[in-house]
Amino acid sequence: MQDLDFVYSVGLWTARPGKEEMFKKSWEDFADWSKRNIPGAITALLLQDKDDPRKFLTVGPWKDDASVQKWRASPEFKAFVGRVKELCDEFRPMTFKAVVSI
């Protein structure tokens, strides 16, 4: 598959003060579970803002939109979001399609 064939799950996160490390560990565990258990998951990346270490961006390519929808509808995803609400002030999930790849 080419980069333009993927659908991308994107999340914007703001960790609560002092909860950054707990958030990173929780996200890593869930991303690992997702890759092993949800067909269509390819990889996942967690980025941390250099200027504001409470802000994170997550990006993950998926085989198709149906895979993302199945993942977000899973009880495990809902449980993860519930746990993260204790660690983050903000979470914005989004889904993107690639339109240019160079």
Image (cartoon, helix red, strand yellow):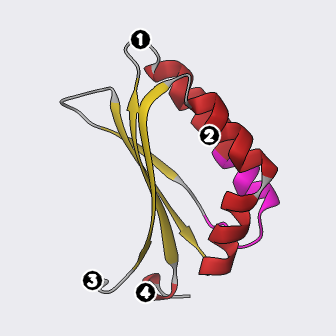
C-alpha gap between disc 3 and disc 2? 33 Å
Query: If the image is split into quadrants, where does the C terminus sit?
Result: bottom left
Placement of 25 over or under 91, stated as above or below: above
> What crowding class fits label 3: few (fewer than 14 Cα within 10 Å), some (14-19), or many (20 or more)?
few
Q: Earlier in the sequence, mark 3 or mark 1?
A: 1
Q: Residue 10 appears in which quarter of the rendering?
A: bottom left
Q: Earlier in the sequence, mark 3 or mark 2?
A: 2
Tell me where residue 98 appears, x and y as whole percent: 38, 81
Left or right: residue 45 versus residue 26 is left
Q: Amino acid at mark 3?
A: Ile
Left or right: residue 63 versus residue 75 is left
Q: Which residue is mark 1?
A: 18
Q: Badges 3 and 2: C-beta atoms under 8 Å apart?
A: no
Q: Which residue is mark 4?
A: 4
Q: Badges 4 and 2: C-beta atoms under 8 Å apart?
A: no
Q: Earlier in the sequence, mark 4 or mark 2?
A: 4
Nearer the observer: mark 3 or 4; the answer is 4
C-alpha gap between disc 1 and disc 2? 19 Å
Q: Residue 84 appears in which quarter of the rendering?
A: top right
Kindly identify which numbered label has been placed on residue 81: 2
Q: Earlier in the sequence, mark 1 or mark 2?
A: 1
Q: Secondary structure at mark 4?
A: helix
What's drawn in magenta, residue-wise? 31-42
Q: Badges 3 and 4: C-beta atoms under 8 Å apart?
A: no
Q: Earlier in the sequence, mark 3 or mark 4?
A: 4
Q: Which residue is mark 3?
A: 102
> What crowding class fits label 2: few (fewer than 14 Cα within 10 Å), some (14-19), or many (20 or more)?
some
Q: Secondary structure at mark 3?
A: loop
> What crowding class fits label 4: few (fewer than 14 Cα within 10 Å), some (14-19), or many (20 or more)?
few
